[in-house]
């Protein structure tokens, strides 16, 4: 499974950004996809995930601000990020799980600063 992330960038506090991820390769039986992030000096943490059945899971810090969606036909997963805060600044990584194995895409930088 190969994961190609796009989007991200820089925005002022309160702004919005969207990151997208395209899965390719052996994508049959992907159980879930989502996004993790890693800020400088911190461990990678879960942001949001969605299962193949559509069940969503969000970190408490992003609930009501971020929305994860997926298109199984296009093999994409998107993360719409609203009301961004400086503490959302991090490298965001696309993630997928297939048959118990985790796959990671390259990171995309999200910077929230005035």
Image (cartoon, rainbow, N blue to C red):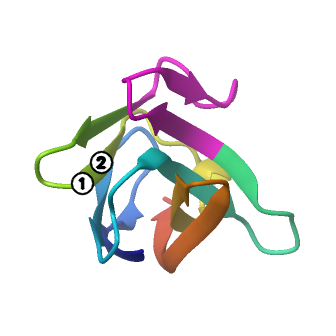
Vertical comparison of 33 with 22: above or below: above
Q: Is residue 105 one of those drawn in magenta?
A: no
**Which stretch did the figure color magenta?**
47-67
Residue 27 pos. (x, y %): 33, 63
Query: Is 108 or 106 nearer to us in this picture?
Result: 106
Query: From the viewer's perspective, is 78 left or right of 95?
Result: left
Q: Which residue is mark 1?
A: 76
Q: Is residue 51 one of those drawn in magenta?
A: yes
Query: From the viewer's perspective, is 3 left or right of 18?
Result: right
- The quarter of the picture where residue 52 lies is top left
Q: Which residue is at 86% across, 63% downward?
A: 43
Q: Is residue 91 visible?
A: no
C-alpha gap between disc 2 and disc 1: 7 Å
Query: From the viewer's perspective, is 3 left or right of 56?
Result: left
Q: Is residue 85 visible?
A: yes
**Residue at the farthest left position:** 73
- Whether label 2 touches label 1, CB < 8 Å: yes
Crowding near the residue tagged with mark 2, few <14, some 14–19, many ≥20 C-alpha atoms within 10 Å: many
Residue 20 pos. (x, y %): 28, 59
Query: Is 57 or 2 nearer to us in this picture?
Result: 2
Q: Which residue is at 57% across, 26% downward?
A: 57
Crowding near the residue tagged with mark 1, few <14, some 14–19, many ≥20 C-alpha atoms within 10 Å: some
Vertical comparison of 102 with 107: above or below: above
Q: Which residue is mark 2?
A: 78
Q: Which residue is at 53% across, 60% downward?
A: 95
């Amino acid at each position: 499974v190969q994961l190609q992330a796009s989007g991200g960038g820089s925005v002022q506090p309160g702004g919005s950004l969207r990151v997208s991820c395209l899965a390719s390769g052996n994508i049959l039986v992907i159980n879930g996809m989502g996004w993790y992030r890693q800020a400088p000096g911190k461990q990678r943490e879960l942001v949001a995930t969605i299962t193949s059945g559509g069940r969503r899971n969000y970190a408490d810090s992003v609930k009501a601000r971020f929305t994860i969606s997926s298109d199984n036909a296009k093999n994409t997963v998107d993360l719409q990020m609203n009301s961004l805060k400086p503490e959302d600044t991090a490298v965001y990584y696309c993630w997928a799980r297939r048959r118990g194995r985790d796959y990671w895409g390259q990171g995309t930088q999200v910077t929230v600063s005035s």
